[in-house]
Image (cartoon, grey):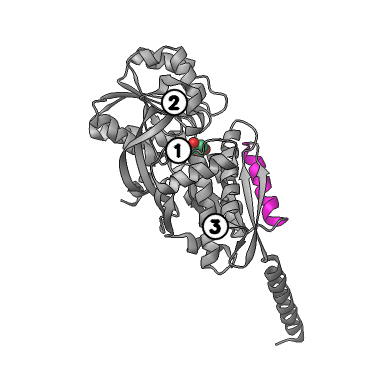
Amino acid sequence: MLRRDLVLTAGALALASMGASSGAAAQETVKIGLILPMTGQQASTGKQVDAAVKLYVAQHGTTVAGKKIEVILKDDTSVPDVAKRLAQELVVNDKVAVLAGMGLTPIALAVAPIATQAKVPEIVMVAGTSTITEASPFVVRTSFTLAQSSVPMAEWAFKNGIKKVVTLVSDYGPGIDAEKSFSEKFKADGGTIVENLRVPLRGPDFSPVLQKVADAKPDALFVFVPSGAGAQFVKQFVERGLDKSGVKLIATGDVIDDDLLNGMGDVVIGVINAHNYSTYHQSPTNKAYVEAFKKANNGMRPNFLSVSGYDGMHLIYEALKKTNGSTDGEKLVAAMKGMAWESPRGPISIDPETRDIVQNIYIRKVEKVDGELYNVEFATIPNVKDPVKAAKKK
Ligand code: PHB
């Protein structure tokens, strides 16, 4: 070997050992970068997930596998470019071991290349477009996909005498997944899709499309809008008189969100919808969760997104235990694959092949119980994998 090479090798070794020792010191604190929409159109999402993350930490402590946990919350204001910049800063400046949150599909997708580059797990606690888990091998999802709820909704509708449907969705990733998966299943079962209507994600006006629904007179209108937008939709549905027109309203649970349900009023009593979580889910785990969440948040009801955030924290804590506190991104993702546990929503697991969530989907009906509106579950489809990815595999 030339002398120059020897010097270089020694230098590289010194650098590597420096890196290793400073890495070990930095690992004493495990930082989690939580990127959420705390302001803007999706602010209710940020509020729910943040509250659940805080509750999980309060209940489970800030020490895991000998390491101190620190959550750094950043407000992406519901803007993907802002989320991307925040993710970069969290990785480069704060040296976070995990990125989490992702309140909208475009945000989860904007952050994915950073997760890949930095080899940092991206725990998706909200966004529901099927393809997100394919955007990076470091994405692991604790929320849901829209096909998970839309396919069972289509199946229930056809079995229960609904033959003609108009669909109405927000015009972006999860809406298009909901529209496609509902329509394909409903048509395969023998139903007719009269029309597929879409509204913009930002500031939607439902009046023009609701006029089309009134003219088409389907047996039912199937709707997806993201969490937080359902109240505005229901208000315009009623203003147009559609609640009295004989057109049944069916939906994914995002529309009939537990968070907004009481404010929607008695007009939504009887609405059938499909989803992964109800505040009213009858299990001891959920009863304890709802009670603790309300106590910590001035009586605020936990919704499905809070549960995804809570489960996301469980996933991170348990993965760290399995790696004995190592924050190596590949090891953490490997530890997450196949993990199974009892969530407030019921039994869940992470599909080891797709890193996507496997969960029960419940068919629910809005009912008034003790003076409050709830989604009361009456049928369960167990262990549903993302139908879009399942179909691709075939
Ligand atoms: C999404 O942007 O993927 C999203 C957000 C809120 C929902 C569902 C999907 O309720």
Q: Which residue is mark 1?
A: 279
Picture quadrant of residue 11: bottom right
Lower sequence index among marks 1 and 3: 1
User: Is 159 or 6 nearer to us in this picture?
Assistant: 159
User: Is 230 or 366 nearer to us in this picture?
Assistant: 366
Which kind of residue does numbered mark 1 sit on?
Thr
- 199 versus 319 height, above or below: above
Lower sequence index among marks 3 and 2: 3
User: Is 190 or 323 nearer to us in this picture?
Assistant: 323
Q: What secondary structure predominates along the stretch shown in magenta?
A: helix
Per the rendering, the mark at residue 371 is 2
Mark 3 to mark 2 CA distance (whole Å)? 38 Å
Q: Are marks 1 and 3 in contact (CB under 8 Å)?
A: no
The segment highlighted magenta reads 78-93
- Closer mark to the observer between disc 3 and disc 2: 2
Give residue 311's position: percent from left, percent from top. Answer: 50, 50
Per the rendering, the mark at residue 316 is 3
Mark 1 to mark 3 CA distance (whole Å)? 24 Å
How many marks overall? 3
Secondary element under disc 3, as helix, strand or loop, is: helix
Q: Estimate how packed mark 3 is, as few (under 14), some (14 to 19) or many (20 or more) residues with alpha carbons within 10 Å.
A: many
- Closer mark to the observer between disc 1 and disc 2: 2
Which kind of residue does numbered mark 2 sit on?
Gly
Secondary element under disc 2, as helix, strand or loop, is: loop
Q: What residue is rendered at 52% in x and 19% in y?
A: 205
Whether residue 214 appears in magenta in the rendering, the answer is no
